[in-house]
Amino acid sequence: MTSQAMHLAAGFFERPVEVVAANLVGCSLTLDGVGGRIVETEAYAADDPASHSFRGLTSRNAPMFGPAGRAYVYRIYGLHWCLNFTCGNGSAVLIRSLEPLAGNEIMAARRGVAGPQNLCSGPGKLCQALGVDGSLNGASVLEQPFALMPGVAHPVIVGPRIGITRGRDTPWRFSHGGSPYLSRRSP
DNA sequence: CCTGTGATCGTCT
DNA sequence: GACGATCACAGGT
């Protein structure tokens, strides 16, 4: 048995985006060995007014229209990065927060803060902590430097997505209930 | 605990 | 020319 067999399979991402988003909660995500457990995600689809892909293909959102299982990394507000996993057909899952478990000292140094609650508790924060930037846009999340592995069964809380002005009625935020590492407390 | 605001720039209108 | 799938910090409750 190779360690590769432990990783998520490519088919994991070729399902409805909200199913992928829910099932990513509890999985382990690291970059070059630095990261932790995913505790919060959001789903975005092509027919979804909150999604970057809603108005069709552009140079920015191109990875969302490419193969499933790739990184879609974009800059927001001119200064932060956000990491998504593509699920095909203009859909993707935003990774919103992690429970930091591996390389916490490296993450604290990159973030310039101390305390595990502040390392990865938001989409911009976790990109800074894991070293994610635009150079990873379009890369396969099934290969180095990514490592993505399944977790154990867990209770998932569903609620409205954060920071959007349209599509507020679609409850596509998925979080690990009660986790102290969320970007915001569970509903 | 909460709300408000400045930072900062690529993307789309 | 306007607007973000955000964050950190300040100030009031």
Image: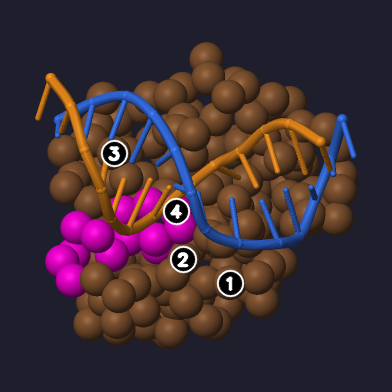
Chain colours: A brown, B blue, C orange
Judge the density around disc 2: few (<14), some (14-19), many (≥20) Cα neighbours within 10 Å. Answer: many
**Residue type at mark 2?**
Cys
Q: Is residue A89 magenta?
A: no
Q: Name the residue at 31% across, 54% down.
A: A121
**Residue type at mark 3?**
Arg
Q: Is residue A107 visible?
A: no
Give the alpha-carbon distance from disc 4 to disc 3, as whole Å: 11 Å
Q: Which residue is mark 4?
A: A123
**Residue type at mark 1?**
Asp
Q: Are marks 3 and 2 on the same chain?
A: yes
Q: Which residues are magenta?
A: A114-126
Dot 2 and dot 4 residues touching (CB under 8 Å): yes
Chain at tag 4: A
Query: In the rendered view of the protein, which quadrant contains the N terminus of chain A?
Result: bottom left
Helix, strand or loop for disc 4: helix
Labels 4 and 1: the sequence-earlier one: 4
Q: Are marks 2 and 1 on the same chain?
A: yes
Helix, strand or loop for disc 1: loop
Q: Name the residue at 68% across, 26% down.
A: A48
Q: Which residue is mark 3?
A: A184
Q: Nearer the viewer, residue A163 or A86?
A: A163
